[in-house]
Amino acid sequence: MTLEIDVLTLFPGMLAGPLDESIPGRAIARGLVTVRVRDLREWGIGRHRSVDDAPYGGGAGMVLRPEPVGDALDALRRPGSTAVLMDPAGEPLRQSIARELAGLEHLILLCPRYEGVDERVRSLVDRELSIGDYVLSGGELAALVVIDAVIRLVPGAIEEASTVEESFSQGLLEYPQYTRPAVYRGMGVPDVLTSGDHGAVARWRHAEALRRTLRRRPDLLEVRQLTPDERRVVDAERAAIDGERSGDHVGRSADEGAGRRSGVDPA
Ligand code: JBZ
């Protein structure tokens, strides 16, 4: 069964490139997913196919009118469709939502422009999603993020091995990856990776994923039940972190290069 996605946008050209390439491009070419990009202006009002108007009550900018959106949804919806409004006030996208969407048969992604949609449009959709807390000019890039996250989860879109590894490390950051050369600008490769001991490699990678997650995204560990082995790794790393903070630590740990140095966001 193929997942069908309709994207409603005033800028159809923004969608084409990214969907032609790489994993989405291949999944679409193989017929695992169908993506149709529809110009909202098809449902614009009057001779000028108008889609926006000034906000009641005044204020800067324009608002996406409800009628083109309502008519477009009426035209595209069928039993089993899920209509999603991309909006900064939507539910933050996460992997479990991507998994839900990947199991649907028909997804309609509505991409607003201007200052956003008329409030009454919210009652016409099934859910509202946001890809994160930064300001975008419109919903197209957000919809592309949703499409990419969803398409990878459609059976056959990526190598089965990748999804198995992903489920093993569910909710953790990735372990460090290395490839040739063995020494790059004086930096070597951890010995365990060239040891040929596959069990040791797997244990090291899992421990590294846990350590990195603890240092960079401790929030991810709070919602994760740890096995006794995992608990030992995390406790040891937490002790190491405490040692570094108390000032007896010299030099840099392997993982502090790019991360945040305090819990305070300077923005
Ligand atoms: C989104 C005007 O349309 C917009 C503007 C910002 C924006 C979206 C749509 S969707 N931000 C997000 O996913 O956070």
Image (spheres, rainbow, N blue to C red):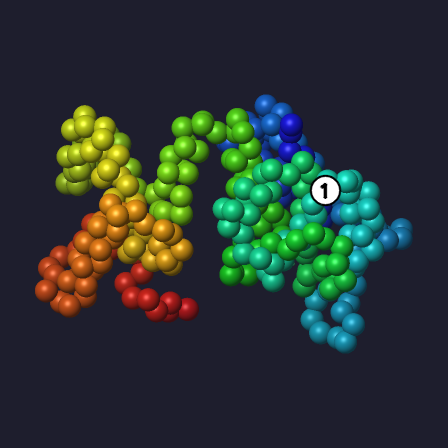
Q: Is residue 124 left or right of residue 33?
A: right
| Amino acid tagged 1 | Ser
Does the image show residue 50? no
Q: Is residue 212 left or right of residue 12?
A: left
Q: Which residue was labeled with disc 1? A: 81
Which is more toward the observer, 48 or 264?
264
Query: Which residue extends farthest bottom?
Result: 57
Give residue 223's position: percent from left, percent from top. Answer: 40, 55
Q: Is residue 176 left or right of residue 105?
A: left
Q: Secondary structure at mark 1?
A: strand
Image quarter (top left, top right, bottom left or bottom right) of the C terminus: bottom left
Does the image show residue 200? yes
Give residue 261's position: percent from left, percent from top. Answer: 28, 63
Where on the picture, by quarter, is residue 183?
A: top left
Q: Residue at x 72, y 42 (%)?
A: 81
Give residue 54's position: percent from left, percent from top. Answer: 77, 67
